[in-house]
């Protein structure tokens, strides 16, 4: 009878192991899924109670004041959060903020910065955007012009700005698709324009720059560009690397979602933390769900902790965990039963041997 139970446990263990393998290798099984918007908001609020107490908020405000100019976006959002939580912030700290505010965000300081953007919008530093609310918009005409310039560089064996080429191609593709998608792809167009502006203003971090360099090099093969593409940009499709195009499109779409959900100034802060297209998609969703809390959570919790709040285990993951636990217990049962059987067998033989020797 014991052998029957050992055999049954072994069969269950093998079946459980096969089920685990099937789940782990299934192409359509996802172990993590996005939480709903309501769940995400609750997760953020609950986490901020731990990571954003009064002491930590004051520390973040002091860090924001160390920058030149001060990080006014973070300062404003932190003060707004502190007011909602009824924190009594340090008086000396508030006086320091007020003094810097009058120096850096006074009428004349703002007028001088904004005048620079009005006079030369293409070279307007993005850092002035939160004061002036300047919006950089790249039109389809600008994309075509950029491609014509870079195409000329390629024909003359001059250096080609691959990032400029890639973002212009993505922008044109999104503009062409806007009619078929009822305008939803315009988010990609706006995002591509923002990335181009941020690149010109040198506001891209090193990891995002490496991602862009890796995915824009060779995205458009000028040797395969057909004649007449200027009047019919859709002809560029045959010269595009589809995989790299998709990566840049996902990145631009995430940035476009940030712009639509959180506005220009907040998007500047988000872009500073983006490493790749996956980050952009995550932060784009966060910006649409929470306009102000997203920045506060990002500053106080950090990107990795924040991203963990945006996902949960799927039903398949829970099934797999339960199956894995059952599989482990089944194996333990098999080994234990086998050990007991062997022990009993050895013990019986030993007793018989002793009895025979004594007799």
Image: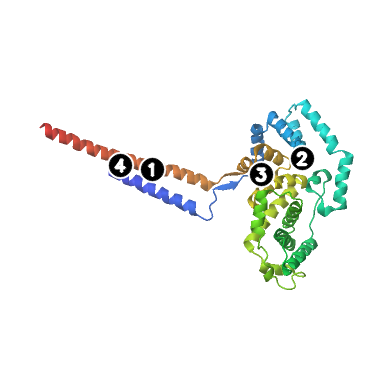
Horizontal and vertical percent position of residue 193: 75, 55
Q: Looking at the image, can residue 132 be seen? A: yes
Of 255 and 69, the residue lying toward us: 69
State the separation of the CA atoms marked 1 and 2.
Answer: 56 Å
Q: Residue at x 35, y 45 (%)?
A: 9
Q: Is residue 138 above or below residue 321?
A: below
Q: Secondary structure at mark 1?
A: helix
In the picture of the structure, the residue carrying the numbered disc 1 is: 330
Q: Residues within 10 Å of mark 3 (few under 14, many from 20)?
A: some
Nearest-to-viewer mark from 2 and 3: 2
* Earlier residue among tags 1 and 2: 2
Nearest-to-viewer mark from 1 and 2: 2
* Earlier residue among tags 3 and 1: 3
Residue 37 is marked as 3
State the separation of the CA atoms marked 3 and 1.
Answer: 40 Å
Asked if disc 4 and disc 1 are in contact, CB closer than 8 Å, the reply is no
In the picture of the structure, the residue carrying the numbered disc 4 is: 338
* Earlier residue among tags 4 and 3: 3
Q: Is residue 348 left or right of residue 43?
A: left
Q: Residue at x 80, y 48 (%)?
A: 125
State the separation of the CA atoms marked 2 and 3.
Answer: 24 Å
State the separation of the CA atoms marked 4 and 3.
Answer: 51 Å
């Amino acid at each position: 009878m014991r052998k029957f139970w050992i055999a049954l446990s072994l069969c269950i263990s093998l079946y459980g192991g096969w089920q685990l393998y099937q789940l782990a290798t299934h192409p359509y099984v996802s172990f993590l899924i996005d939480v709903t918007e309501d769940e995400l908001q609750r997760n953020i609020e609950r986490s901020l109670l731990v990571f954003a107490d009064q002491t930590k908020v004051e520390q973040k405000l002091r860090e924001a004041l160390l920058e030149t100019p001060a990080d006014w976006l973070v300062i404003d959002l932190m003060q707004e959060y502190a007011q909602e939580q009824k924190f009594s912030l340090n008086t000396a700290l508030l006086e320091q903020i007020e003094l810097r505010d009058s120096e850096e965000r006074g009428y004349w300081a703002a007028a001088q910065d904004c005048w620079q953007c009005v006079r030369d919008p293409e070279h307007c530093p993005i850092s002035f955007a939160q004061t002036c609310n300047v919006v950089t918009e790249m039109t389809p005409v600008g994309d075509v012009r950029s491609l014509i310039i870079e195409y000329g560089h390629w024909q003359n064996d001059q250096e080609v700005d691959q990032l400029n080429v890639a973002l212009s191609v993505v922008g044109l593709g999104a503009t062409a698709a806007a009619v078929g998608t009822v305008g939803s792809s315009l988010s990609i167009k706006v995002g591509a324009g923002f990335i181009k502006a941020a690149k010109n203003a040198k506001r891209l971090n090193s990891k995002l720059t490496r991602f862009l360099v890796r995915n824009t090099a060779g995205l458009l093969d000028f040797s395969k560009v057909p004649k007449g593409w200027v009047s019919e940009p859709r002809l560029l499709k045959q010269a595009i690397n589809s995989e790299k195009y998709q990566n840049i499109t996902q990145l631009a779409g995430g940035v476009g979602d940030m712009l639509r959900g959180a506005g220009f100034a907040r998007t500047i802060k988000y872009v500073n933390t983006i490493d790749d297209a996956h980050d952009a998609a995550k932060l784009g969703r966060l910006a649409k769900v929470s306009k102000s809390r997203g920045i506060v959570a990002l500053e106080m919790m950090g990107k990795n902790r924040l991203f963990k709040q945006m996902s949960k285990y799927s039903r398949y993951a829970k099934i797999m965990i339960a199956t894995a636990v059952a599989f482990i217990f089944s194996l333990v049962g098999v080994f234990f039963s086998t050990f007991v059987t062997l022990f009993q067998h050895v013990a019986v033989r030993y007793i018989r041997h002793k009895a025979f020797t004594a007799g």
